[in-house]
Image (cartoon, rainbow, N blue to C red):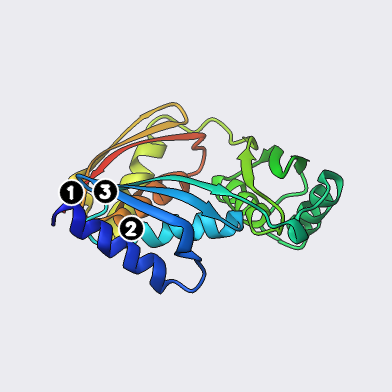
Amino acid sequence: MTDDELQDWVREELSWDPKVDSAAIAVSATDGVVTLRGTVASFRQKREAQRAAERVYGVTSVRNELEVRIVHGHRRQDVDLRGAVLRAMALDGLIPETVDAKADSGVVTLTGTAAWQYQREEAEFVAGNVSGVVDVDNQIALTTPQPKAGAVKQSIERAFQRNANLDAEGLSVTTHGNMVMLRGAVSSLDERDAAVAAAWAAPGVAAVENRIVVEY
């Protein structure tokens, strides 16, 4: 597929997705790397635009350079925005009470602690859906205990083997304490994301370095 063809496919997917207003989004592609530029009306749309681009066959990575410009009627004072984010997170049973938030000119910073990566991701997802948010800075710290030697590597490799969406033969796992590095090649961004999610699900993991490449 040529760069021009890939650009056209991404543009079509953005226009196809009803959650995205693609009128002010410009798309460029170079060797599978897609860059999104322009403006959207919410942080949620910025995130959905990236997901739409990542769904397209031939895309190996997405650089999301979209700017969020909140229309005047949807802008909120920082104190009101912080309150809205905290209320939204309080209603989500996956987010621990140890997570806090602050807002500055529409940018929400998440702080506090969580035991699992999925809790950090859930807090970021919920905060990003609140009207008036232009960006989310996730500074939540993980409080995972130090795992037993070798336990993390083995549990991740077994998770790869169980996952029907992964070709485990093309992946390798190395660990150092509670740090994980993933290497290898997969055939789609979805497959790469599934591998990263499986690594984060291992008990005791505090950081995942993703060096997996996408090869079509």
Q: Residue at x 68, y 51 (%)?
A: 133
Give the mark nearest the N terminus, 3 or 1: 3
| Residue 164 visible in the displayed image | no
How packed is label 2: few (under 14 Cα within 10 Å), some, or many (20 or more)?
A: some
| Residue 204 visible in the displayed image | yes
How packed is label 1: few (under 14 Cα within 10 Å), some, or many (20 or more)?
A: some
Closer to us: mark 3 or mark 1? 3
Q: CA distance from mark 3 to mark 1?
A: 16 Å
Q: Which x, y percent locates residue 47? A: 51, 55
* Three-letter amino acid code at the position of disc 3: Ala
In the image, 62 versus 139, the foreground residue is 62
> For residue 92, what is the image quadrant?
bottom right
Q: Which x, y percent locates residue 99? A: 73, 43
Secondary structure of residue under mark 3: strand
State whether residue 160 is above or below residue 112.
Answer: below
Q: CA distance from mark 3 to mark 2?
A: 19 Å
The quarter of the rendered structure image containing the N terminus is bottom left
Q: Residue at x 45, y 59 (%)?
A: 49
Give the mark nearest the N terminus, 3 or 2: 3
Q: Residue at x 64, y 35 (%)?
A: 139
Q: CA distance from mark 2 to mark 1?
A: 12 Å
The residue tagged 3 is 29
* Three-letter amino acid code at the position of disc 1: Glu
Q: Which mark is residue 215?
A: 1
Left or right position of 147 against 100 = left
State whether residue 44 is above or below residue 13.
Answer: above
Q: Which mark is residue 190?
A: 2
* Three-letter amino acid code at the position of disc 2: Asp
